[in-house]
Amino acid sequence: MSSLIEKAAQRLEQLRQAGADMPASTPAPAASQPSASAAPAAAPVPFPVAEREVRIPDATQSKAVEMDLETLRVAGFVTPHAPRSAIADQFRVIKRPLLANATGKGAAPVPNGNLIMVTSAMPGEGKSFTAINLAMSIAMELDYRVLLVDADVARPSLRQALGLAASPGLLDLLIDRKTQMSDVLLRTNVDKLSVLLSGTPHPRATELLASDAMTSLIEEMGQRYPDRIIIFDSPPLLLTTEARVLATHMGQIIVVVQAEKTLQSQVQHAMTTIEACPVKLMLLNQARGGDQDAYGYGYGYGYGYGQTASQAADANVPVAAAT
């Protein structure tokens, strides 16, 4: 049988050599074995899938504003790149314990230590002046960002002091929930310093400051900006109750006292309204003394006036004297 097959194959080969047209032979592959010369299978076509919607954070930055730094320097404020001054050195001393408490580097942890309220017992004692200088001084640090908030909504003064135009601010955030922080925050030409003005005047401004909306906003600000020092210029403690409500959310409070003007009884009364705050610093503004050093500041401990060094040692409220 095999000889017949071999003869047939030889005959076909002779016919091909003779030039006869022969159909191409395609051997059938074995049913049980795939052809080794089969073409590679085509890559599977992916099933069409709807694109995932990616939410990109809003890259719109807050509004940029320009402050006249030279005018501020002449008015007695701390400004970057200004020659060394007594007021700048005083606030270097004042801010140091505040920053330590805000960053957990103090003697004990301070809840909400990055929320600092600057207030006074009565109007006209220099709290806004102190708040601006403190914010400027901290903004000059390498590792901190500062947000300065005008929370004295009944008598706002930061806008005029900084020479800024009227714009939406704190009250607008409290009234309209659709208003975003980026809509009202002002980026200044002082690196690392932003400002939140009091905003559009409202007949119930003081009630809004004591509202649940303000409480929620403070909590949101503290959680949203944990790396930022937030300074509130608040109303005086003895004129309204809103400042006392605001104080309950603060980690640190500075009470500004004008030397030779504010009564000791007023200071004592004001301090009793903020007893719940873990850290209270009393700053003596426009102090005069013959024992101040070359930098023009005094720093000690005490409560009230007319205390000696030994009497001050038993007190627990720091007093920084600024001239």
Image: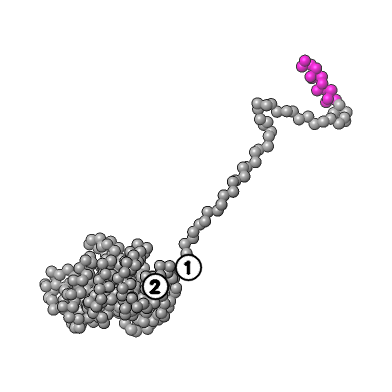
- Label 1, secondary structure: give it: loop
Q: Residue at x 41, y 77 (%)?
A: 167
Tag 2 and tag 1, C-beta contact below 8 Å = no
Q: Which residue is mark 1?
A: 60
The coloring applied to the image is one colour
The amino acid beneath tag 1 is: Thr
- Label 2, secondary structure: give it: helix
The amino acid beneath tag 2 is: Asp
Label annotation for residue 172: 2
Majority secondary structure in the magenta region: helix
Q: Is residue 322 shown above or below 100? A: below
Question: The N terminus appears in which quarter of the rendering?
Answer: top right
| Magenta span of residues | 1-14
Q: Is residue 24 left or right of residue 63?
A: right
Q: Residue at x 56, y 52 (%)?
A: 50
For this rendering, which residue is in front, 53 or 228? 53
Question: The C terminus appears in which quarter of the rendering?
Answer: bottom left
For this rendering, which residue is in front, 222 or 216? 216
Q: Residue at x 27, y 77 (%)?
A: 127
Q: Residue furthest front?
A: 203
Q: Is residue 91 shown above or below 49? A: below
